[in-house]
Amino acid sequence: MKLRTLVFLNALAVGVSIGAVNLYFQHKWFYFAVSLVIATIVSYFVFYYLIEKYVYSKIKVIYKMIHSLKLGKDLKDALAEYVSPDPINDVQQEVKEWARDKKHEIDELKKQEKFRREFLSNISHEFKTPIFAIEGYVEALQDGALQDPELAQSFLNKVSSNVERLSVLIKDLNEISRLESGELPINLQKFELTALIKEVMESLELKAEKYKIKLVFKEKYDVPTWVKADKEKIRQVLINLIDNSFKYGKENGTTFITVFALHDQYLVEITDDGMGINEEHLPRLFERFYRTDSSRSRQIGGSGLGLAIVKHIVEAHHQTINVRSTEKLGSTFGFTLEKAKEGGLNIPMITTDVD
Ligand code: ADP
């Protein structure tokens, strides 16, 4: 309702009341009419003046403040001072919207804060474990284990593997933070996928032997599989996934790599016949530092960031990654890549930043 209408109704109510009192005492409709008109007019101006001075002008200031806060400085300057013709109604609407936006903002900040806290506690936990282990072995060596060369050697090996773990952790942390900050942009180029898979398999041959795992590439196509992606980052994805298939695979097991042609994508799958993953873990598997209980208790694994890096790289290509797994039977990790038209090798195409 407009301010004028509101004031008029109030004034009318006063006018009618005074008119009614007059009619009661004077018994003349003339007095009723005169007092009604005069009281209504006087009340109208008095009310209007008071409301405008003490309520409306203040609401207008509040409205202007909220309006400019919502618009931000630049837009406010562009639109200059804006005064709503009906600030009482608008202020209600704007406050509602403003409160909703602020709530959303606060929820988002709380989420980020929780994430930061968890991240810090995870990092300190990840560092603590190998550092405590190193401390323990060094103390044992200082306390006399050095006298027994065999024991000393085994302790030194353990120190060395923990140092290695720390260095992997720092390397992966550095990698993920550079990926997320956009420092490592995605350089899309055209390359042949099967050739890259073979290169990666060759580079991991020794490691496969160490874990006693057979690495098999199920080549389905004899035509070249051209993709449009960042070759080095996809190499990293393949290494991380194949490496996991070794770590969580079984002795004398097999890791299969398969490429499927979809409509305008290729799907690469890495399948192992290892320990598998319980269904309850699957939704959180790609989170940083998330590990299943069995891999925790076996004290294997690297930084806990491998899959988070993989997911980040695949999503920065606007592609998808998924996992299927059955405990004690094995797991399959699959990710897609965009097909490219056949043609020359390694021609840089487009460069995009990581989201
Ligand atoms: P990590 O450095 O611990 O290997 P990742 O991010 O690569 O970190 O993997 C996260 C967790 O996912 C692992 O700790 C493990 O519990 C589980 N995982 C990953 N790959 C496999 C796999 N192929 N089979 C079973 N579990 C796996």
Image: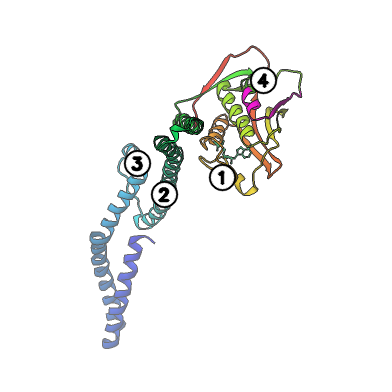
Alpha carbon separation for disc pair 2 and 1: 32 Å
**SS of the residue under disc 3:** helix
**Cβ at disc 4 under 8 Å from ligand 1:** no
Residue type marked 4: Lys
In this rendering, the label closer to the viewer, 3 or 4: 4
Sequence-earlier tag: 3 or 1:
3
Sequence-earlier tag: 2 or 4:
2
Sequence-earlier tag: 2 or 1:
2
Q: Which residue is mark 4?
A: 198
Alpha carbon separation for disc pair 2 and 4: 45 Å
Residue type marked 1: Ser
Sequence-earlier tag: 3 or 4:
3
Q: Is residue 79 left or right of residue 254?
A: left
Alpha carbon separation for disc pair 3 and 4: 54 Å
Residue type marked 2: Lys
Sequence-earlier tag: 2 or 3:
3
Mark 2 Cα within 10 Å, few/some/many (few <14, many 20+)?
Answer: few
- Tell me where residue 199 appears, x and y as whole percent: 63, 19
In this rendering, the label closer to the viewer, 2 or 3: 2
Q: Is residue 105 left or right of residue 298?
A: left
- Tell me where residue 252 appears, x and y as whole percent: 71, 32
Q: Which residue is mark 1?
A: 297
